[in-house]
Image: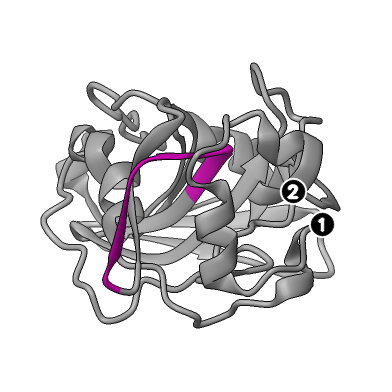
């Protein structure tokens, strides 16, 4: 039988039966009926379904996780530098020390949203690496406030290579700040002044408080 001989194909599904009735209606009006075990039909359909491979292309430095969804990606980055210029309101702090930061966001149609930030243990990451409360004033739990700043044009993952630096260049304000988010319990401006001449390792000895969560918790959102 050729495909052009078939006018219509019908599947009759009965939830009370383990077999599926198939009916082919030919161009000459003939009906051909078969009964197929449900499992066999499912396996046959799976064998003929093709899903295009998901290709990320060249990945930016510091990418540690990607989660693909039908309409976009969740991307997790880590900072690969331990100092950069940051701002608290209008005050610049050149070469400000940084802990081991993680940044997570959703990429959809070239637009970034749902930003999150966390502080991880020093050194190489593992799924069990511990997380600490972020000391910066625009982060609460994992939620990161980036204000009304647009993050558009990210139509390839490679363009994310400068995202961590861009986020850190946004002026820190007092959106979420709580003094008890660090061991020091200082107001935000005093915290920046206190940290500006410290080594990055100082965060882990004198500043950070454990969250009781891990890198796996962060990647899962």
Q: Position of residue 76 (x, y in %)?
A: 48, 42
Q: Is residue 147 above or below residue 159?
A: below
Residue reaching furthest to the left: 153
Q: Nearer the viewer, residue 127 or 21?
A: 127
Residue at the image position 64 percent from the left and 45 percent from the top: 119
- Does 130 sit left or right of 26 as displayed? right
Q: Position of residue 138 (x, y in %)?
A: 50, 71
Identify the image's colour scheme: rainbow, by chain, secondary structure or one colour.
Answer: one colour
SS category of the residue bearing label 1: loop
The reply to whether residue 221 is in sight is: yes
The reply to whether residue 22 is in sight is: no
Residue reaching furthest to the top: 124
Q: Position of residue 53 (x, y in %)?
A: 34, 28
Query: Mark 1 and 2 residues: CB-CB less than 8 Å, in contact?
Result: yes
Binning the other alpha carbons within 10 Å of mark 2 as few (below 14), some (14 to 19) or many (20 upward) gives some
- Which residue has dot 1 on it? 183
Task: Give the mark count.
Answer: 2
């Amino acid at each position: 039988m050729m495909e052009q001989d078939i006018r219509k194909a019908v599947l009759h599904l009965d939830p009370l039966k383990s077999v599926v009735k198939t009916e082919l209606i030919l161009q000459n009006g003939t009906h051909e009926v078969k009964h197929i075990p449900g499992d066999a039909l499912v396996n046959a359909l799976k064998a003929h379904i093709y899903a295009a491979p998901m290709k990320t292309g060249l990945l930016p430095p510091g990418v540690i996780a990607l989660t693909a969804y039908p309409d976009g990606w969740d991307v997790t980055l880590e900072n690969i530098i331990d100092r950069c210029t940051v701002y608290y309101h209008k005050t610049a702090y050149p070469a400000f020390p940084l802990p081991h930061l993680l940044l997570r966001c959703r990429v959809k149609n070239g637009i970034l949203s749902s930003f999150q930030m966390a502080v991880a243990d020093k050194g190489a990451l593992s799924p069990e690496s511990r997380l600490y409360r972020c000391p910066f004033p625009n982060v609460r739990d994992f939620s990161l406030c980036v204000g009304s700043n647009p993050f558009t044009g990210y139509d390839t993952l490679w363009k994310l290579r400068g995202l961590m630096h861009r986020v850190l260049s946004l002026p820190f304000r007092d959106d979420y700040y709580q003094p008890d988010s660090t061991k020091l319990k200082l107001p935000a401006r005093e915290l920046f002044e206190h940290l500006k001449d410290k080594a990055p390792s100082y965060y882990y000895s004198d500043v950070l408080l454990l969250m009781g969560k891990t890198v796996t918790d962060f990647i899962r959102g």
